[in-house]
Amino acid sequence: MKMSGARMLLECLKREGVDTIFGLPGGAVLPIYDVLYDFEGLRHILVRQEAAAGHAAEGYSRTTGKVGVCLVTSGPAATNLVTALQDALMDSIPIVAFTGQVPTHLIGNDAFQEADNVGITRPATKHNFLVKDGKDLGPIIREAFHLASTGRPGPVHVDLPKDILVKEAELIWPERVHMRSYNPNYDGHPGQIKKAARSIVRAKRPVLYVGGGVISSDAHAELLELAELTQIPVTTTLMGLGAFPSAHPLSLEMLGMHGTYYANMAVHHSDVLLAIGARFDDRVTGRVDAFAPSAEIVHVDIDPSSISKNIKVDVPIVGDCRRVLRALVEAVREELHAEVPQAVREGRKQWQAQIAEWREKFPLRYDWTDDVIKPQYVVQEVSRLTGGEAFMVTGVGQHQMWAAQYYRFKHPRMWCTSGGLGTMGYGLPTAMGVQAAHPGRLVVNVDGDGSFAMNSQELATCFTEHLPVKTVIMNNNGHGMVRQWQRIIYKERYCAIDLPGIPDWVKLAEAYGCVGLRVTRPSEVGPAIEKMLATPAPVVLDVIVDKDECVFPMVPAGGANTDMILVAPTREVREKAAKSQTGF
Amino acid sequence: MSNGNGVEPRKHTIAILVENKFGVLSRVAGLFSARGYNIESLSVGETLDPTVSRMTIVVRGDEFVIEQVMKQLHKLIDVVKVSDLTDDSHVQRELVLIRVNAEPQHRNEILRTADIFRAKVIDVTPSSFVLEATGDEGKLEALIELLRPMGIQEIVRTGKVAIARGPKTRARKTEPAQKRPRVPDDPRVVGFAD
Ligand SMILES: Cc1ncc(C[n+]2csc(CCOP(=O)(O)OP(=O)(O)O)c2C)c(N)n1
């Protein structure tokens, strides 16, 4: 069948099962929008800035398990998109991004709105393509979706020169995708799995350390089974939140820089550490030579290059988390048939008691006051009033960490946050993508006043596309996280952190046709959240919070995880932190 | 990243088979710059299968760095195969062109040296010779050292190419035996004829 490249693109997207595209038109992609005009079966959501299209695709993808799709024009649109691509790369989110390009004969000519799109996105994607011939378009789209969604998922970019979109070509649609150079390994090595099972069963102080890979591979049920079978406590990374229920007795919640005391202590003192779909990021490990120093480390990951990258691993297992966990559960069952030595049983009992003691000693805590709103309390109220059944999205900063610490996670694929890149401005557009994928469900964006400002224009998209996202701004009139570092590590030399109360977020929300609410007193928080959740329109709830509040525990960058700062710092603590500081 | 217990950094010769596609060289080069690995030399050429190119890269690093380099290369979608030839039995060659001052009192000595090293004189002017030599690193370094006192004007090196020895030939799958080997006109391959 012959058709224009533009029609072929949309036809192929439909065949790939795409139902929603986030995009913004421009000269180079006008042929596509011309076909889209009366094309059936694809919803196009017009964003207000291209990075938002990318983030929306991320939110759509993370919460559905499907590939998210965005479409933008050439040059400045493509460069605007780059942040979202890098964000998806670092958090392994499968999206396919299409950009327009100047016609083939003008490429390299410094034509109007030309940029070396594939050159720019190369390091920010899992793979990218420049389509040079219309007949390649079908096979390239097949490969793009295949690459994005298999192996370690990630963003794939396809650059579309305008002449390719205009010219007619034969649609070629390969039924199967085969790439000789790309064959991810899904099944873990049986010998290694057996070895891991043996270590687990004989461990006296085991911990499961779980990352976003468990969510990407939908392995939460298998994880729960393994944890309950072996009674091993579970800590998750920022990206792994939701993979294991926060309220489960075995949950240690998050580890790392702002992890719980008990998670970091347990990992540090473990004798067997089972890392599943996590990548030993520096925000998790702290100083690497002090990370889990006495543990035998088992690492399950789909990406061989994640293994032994930062920390030397004793039992590497390359494979899909779900399949490996399933095999591991079987292997552990076999091992359990044999008699478990008395010493191991004793050790495990002591370990449980030790962890209980750590939990008791330093639970997550903050000081309540009746006058100022504590941001942690706001998250607790959101958690209580949504019953953990809302999709949660965040910006980047203190509020993100409080959301991670205080929200009670029940289900996987309901938490979206910019983990690897730490992209301020991620919240609203991502929440929009989540809402587009789940009409009628509650989507809450817990944002900071700094982060929200970076993409607040998307309130227009929320309004016009009927995406009733609920944003809670933890308004501390500044870049709180930066302020926290300057307070603790830079001797209170506050610099470039004040965002003194402008804009008026209520008025801004109203200017965009959304509902704006504001609270300033703790007693108003609950009712305001209830009102927000009950409003069918997009809402911005401006919560004026205590600007002096800091996120604790905190491991200063470059410090060991046992060097946690647990309470508001005294001078000695500040000096200690300044000493162990090796870089922001 | 080294954990401190890796062996000392040393040079590794890595062979990479890549899809002969648009942009593949920049993918490989970009990987090295993005991750801060140092390439000492890189050479590229087609293989018997025109859809596959072969790169030979010399990179310095300890065991952990090299393991990462290999894994990261393999992660590139267009990379078909990566092998570290360093500890396998292999031969490697490099070609160098040297333009050296040819003062009358030195001309004989240069020619004798060239002869000993089986270098060819491929261009002569009243004041200079251009020599072509192939060999392994040690041989080429020795030649250059001997010529240095005469005044070397310019050196151009191809970077190393390497091939495994014996029956364990590399990349069988992509180089079907029935295909007649083409005579390469690429000077980078000349080293094999030494
Ligand atoms: C795009 C971008 N620019 C800068 C930063 C550095 N940064 C990290 S947190 C932060 C402050 C965030 O402020 P806000 O969104 O108000 O959140 P808060 O920490 O106050 O909760 C900054 C500037 C970043 N992460 N991303």
Image (tube, grey):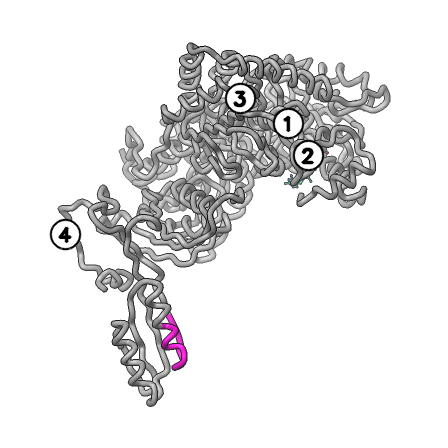
Label 2 Cα neighbours within 10 Å, binned few <14 / some 14-19 / many ≥20: many
Question: Pointer 1 and pointer 2: residues touching (CB < 8 Å)?
Answer: yes
Q: Residues within 10 Å of mark 1 (few under 14, many from 20)?
A: many
Q: Disc 2 on helix, strand or loop?
A: loop
The answer to whether marks 3 and 4 mark residues whose Cβ atoms lie closer than 8 Å is no
Q: Chain of mark 4?
A: B
- Considering only order in the chain, which callout, 2 or 3, is on the residue closer to the N terminus? 3
* Ligand 1 lies in quarter: top right
Q: Chain of mark 1?
A: A
Q: Compute the Cα span from label 3 to label 2.
A: 28 Å
* Residue A197 pos. (x, y %): 44, 20
In this rendering, the answer to whether A394 lies above or below A358 is below
**Residue under pointer 3:** A413
Question: Disc 2 marks which residue?
Answer: A555
Q: CA distance from mark 3 to mark 4?
A: 55 Å
Q: Magenta region: which residues?
A: B144-155
The disc, 3 or 1, on the residue closer to the chain's N-terminal end is 1
| Residue toward you, A101 or A177 | A177
- How many other residues sit within 10 Å of disc 4, few (<14), some (14-19) or many (≥20)? few
Callout 3: SS: loop
Q: Residues within 10 Å of mark 3 (few under 14, many from 20)?
A: many
Q: CA distance from mark 3 to mark 1?
A: 24 Å
Q: Nearer the viewer, mark 3 or mark 1?
A: 1
Above or below — where is A575 with respect to B102?
above
Residue A474 coordinates in the image, percent (x, y): 73, 28
Specify whether residue A463 is in view: no
User: For mark 1, what is the residue?
Assistant: A264
* Residue A39 drawn at (x, y percent): 41, 28
Choose top left, top right, bottom left or bottom right for residue A231: top right
User: Quick check: do tags 3 and 1 share a chain?
Assistant: yes
- The kind of residue on which mark 1 rests is Asn
Q: Is mark 1 within 8 Å of ligand 1?
A: no
